[in-house]
Image: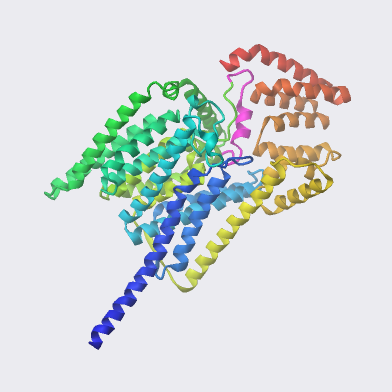
């Protein structure tokens, strides 16, 4: 009897230990699941960084999940897949650019490195959780979270489409234009909204294939997701639906081959065939029903999207050939784009991104950057051929395929919430390459590092709130408010990642109007390298004229007018006022500005056609 009691106590103790271990891992996985859902539902999008709150919460949940896993798991084996080296090598390229002075603001480079370190940490933690809990449990958690987020986003999109978003303020982002142009959920961007709905569709297909989602729930869910995707007006949905259908057919064939090889037949194959049929049938039916919607007609208007993207792609290639080794710098795409424009050519607008991940990396980081990005990925792809095509790997392939399609047309992986989902997909795809056992001092150092990272994230949120409240919120102008504004600006300038935003918002705090023209030019040069807006570009021409560099001012005005032809008339009046006050300095520039405005008015049909 005594032996039975001892054995029961031992089993109870073992069970409690397993429960603690599982609790830590499940808690960490819940954090990652929130990262894949909550940031896509936040309705806050304000200047100066409209996506900041959503991105910050993605970073927070990723760090919190890593900290819980390292701090409370009794036995830790950190898994390092080979793709972990991608963010690490890219961080080294960024550090090299900082050391060579290629960033106008070092704070921008440090901020980019911090994000890349977060990606590396997230890859390790997600892979470790997948190894510890098993691929199926990990995938089901993540798929359920993405699906819940997608369904809620679809509801928000439908509310916007029927014009009822005002009744749900502030929980639903208001539409800035007619719903017929397209809705965007709480992501406030149509293509991002469509991307997330496609990720939710992939999650629904996986959960159905793994017999986690019942048929009676699967049918209305995919109908809602497909309808909302069409309402978005995004043209990418055709590609998403095609790749999901193709990968699902590949999954069925792979399973049939496996079953034939082992002379067995699993019931999941029949379920997969049903899911394919239902997905295609409801997709076609929904498309036919939605064919009368104005958003549906927009899907066929390809000239706008192809024209603007081919324009950016061509200039990205030009930047690469001009700077093949290290690129133009991660924060200098728009600045160099303006320098490549031709006066009077068709106007497609100025953008900081090439709308293609590969071309973007080639342009801003050259051969070194693209090698740092691709080499670990190619090594990982090589290993994929040795692995079985399971439902979990199918799910990961679907997520990655959707993100790749979007990355070839825009820049979703520059947003941490999409980047987090990409990292989770990698964890499901690549098995352990190296394992590190974390005990004693190693655990202490890892925990301290994560605490420091979490503190840095909280400080960044505090700094951003101060930036937003001080410079982007209407306030009464009093002497006390001006003093507080100056104090906040100097503090953020020295001790935050937002140095460039402070100089952009309040240049007068750092260089007064009484300062020399050279001091003003130095500050404005930094700002235009970071954010060459119309105001900054035209201001630079005036400052050059103030410094008696009239010829350079004329060249700069033409550069600004080429980049912002529709804003030129507004600035001509300013230059004429300057000429009236000091003709010797500004007279020639004002005359040239007037002539340029006349030429642009004559070329307007050609520029806008």
Q: Is residue 91 left or right of residue 379?
A: right
**x and y, in percent, of residue 303 in the image:** 47, 20
**In terms of depth relative to the viewer, which is nearer, 197 or 240?**
197
Q: Is residue 336 left or right of residue 196?
A: right
Residue 355 is inside the magenta segment? no
Can residue 30 be seen here? The reply is yes
- Could you tell me what secondary structure mostly forms the magenta stretch? loop
Q: Which residues are magenta?
A: 327-346
Q: Quadrant of the N terminus?
A: bottom left
**x and y, in percent, of residue 418 in the image:** 46, 44
**x and y, in percent, of residue 450 in the image:** 53, 62
Q: Is residue 426 left or right of residue 323?
A: left
Residue lying farthest to the bottom in this orientation? 2
Residue lying farthest to the left in this orientation? 263
**In terms of depth relative to the viewer, which is nearer, 319 or 494?**
494
Can residue 358 be seen here? The reply is no
Q: Which residue is pictured at 71% across the width and 43% down the height?
A: 471
Q: Quadrant of the C terminus?
A: top right
- The part of the image, by quadrant, that contains residue 363 is top right
- The part of the image, by quadrant, that contains residue 565 is top right
């Amino acid at each position: 009897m005594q032996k039975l009691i001892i054995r029961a106590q031992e089993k109870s103790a073992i069970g409690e230990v397993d429960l603690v271990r599982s609790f830590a891992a499940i808690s960490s996985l819940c954090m990652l699941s929130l990262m894949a859902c909550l940031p896509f539902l936040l309705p806050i999008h304000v200047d100066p960084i409209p996506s900041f709150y959503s991105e910050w919460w993605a970073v927070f949940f990723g760090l919190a999940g890593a900290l819980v896993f390292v701090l409370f798991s009794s036995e830790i084996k950190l898994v390092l897949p080979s793709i972990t080296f991608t963010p690490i090598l890219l961080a080294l390229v960024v550090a090299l650019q900082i050391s060579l002075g290629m960033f106008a603001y070092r704070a921008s480079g440090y901020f980019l490195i911090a994000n890349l370190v977060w990606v590396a940490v997230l890859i390790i933690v997600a892979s470790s959780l997948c190894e510890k809990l098993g691929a199926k449990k990990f995938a089901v958690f993540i798929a359920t979270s993405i699906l819940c987020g997608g369904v809620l986003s679809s509801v928000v999109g439908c509310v916007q489409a029927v014009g009822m978003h005002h009744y749900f303020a502030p929980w639903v982002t208001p539409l800035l234009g007619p719903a017929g142009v397209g809705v965007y959920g709480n992501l406030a961007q149509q293509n991002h909204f469509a991307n997330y709905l496609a990720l939710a569709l992939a999650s629904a297909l996986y959960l159905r294939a793994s017999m986690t989602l019942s048929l009676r729930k699967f049918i209305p869910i995919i109908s809602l997701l497909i309808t909302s995707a069409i309402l978005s007006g995004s043209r990418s949905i055709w590609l998403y639906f095609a790749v999901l259908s193709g990968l699902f057919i590949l999954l069925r064939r792979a399973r049939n081959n496996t079953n034939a090889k082992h002379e067995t037949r699993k019931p999941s194959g029949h379920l997969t065939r049903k899911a394919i049929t239902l997905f295609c049938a409801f997709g076609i039916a929904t498309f036919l029903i939605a064919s009368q919607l104005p958003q549906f007609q927009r899907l066929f208007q390809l000239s706008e999207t192809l024209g603007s993207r081919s324009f950016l792609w061509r200039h990205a290639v030009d930047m690469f050939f001009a700077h093949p080794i290290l690129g133009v710098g991660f924060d200098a795409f728009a600045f160099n784009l303006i320098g490549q424009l031709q006066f009077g050519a068709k106007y497609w607008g100025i953008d900081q991104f090439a709308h293609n991940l590969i071309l973007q990396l080639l342009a801003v980081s050259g051969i070194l950057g693209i090698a740092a990005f691709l080499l670990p990925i190619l090594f990982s792809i090589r290993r994929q051929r040795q692995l079985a095509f399971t439902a979990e790997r199918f799910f990961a392939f679907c997520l990655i395929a959707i993100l790749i399609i979007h990355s070839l047309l825009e820049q979703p992986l520059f947003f941490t919430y999409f980047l987090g989902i990409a990292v989770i997909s990698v964890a499901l795809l690549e098995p352990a390459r190296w394992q590190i056992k974390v005990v004693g001092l190693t655990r202490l150092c890892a925990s301290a590092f994560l605490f420091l990272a979490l503190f840095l994230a909280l400080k960044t949120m505090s700094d951003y709130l101060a930036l937003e409240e001080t410079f982007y919120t209407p306030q009464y102008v009093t002497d006390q408010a001006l003093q507080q504004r100056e104090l906040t600006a100097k503090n953020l300038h020295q001790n935050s990642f937002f140095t460039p935003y402070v100089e952009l918002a309040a240049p007068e705090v750092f260089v007064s109007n009484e300062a020399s023209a050279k001091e003003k030019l130095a500050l404005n040069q930094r700002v235009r390298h970071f954010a060459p807006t119309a105001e900054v570009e035209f201001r630079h021409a005036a400052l050059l004229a103030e410094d008696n560099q009239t010829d350079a001012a004329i060249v700069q005005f033409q550069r600004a007018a080429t980049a912002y032809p529709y804003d030129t008339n507004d600035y001509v009046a300013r230059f004429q006022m300057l000429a009236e006050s000091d003709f010797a300095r500004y007279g020639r520039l004002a005359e040239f500005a007037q002539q340029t405005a006349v030429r642009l008015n004559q070329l307007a049909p050609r520029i806008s056609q």
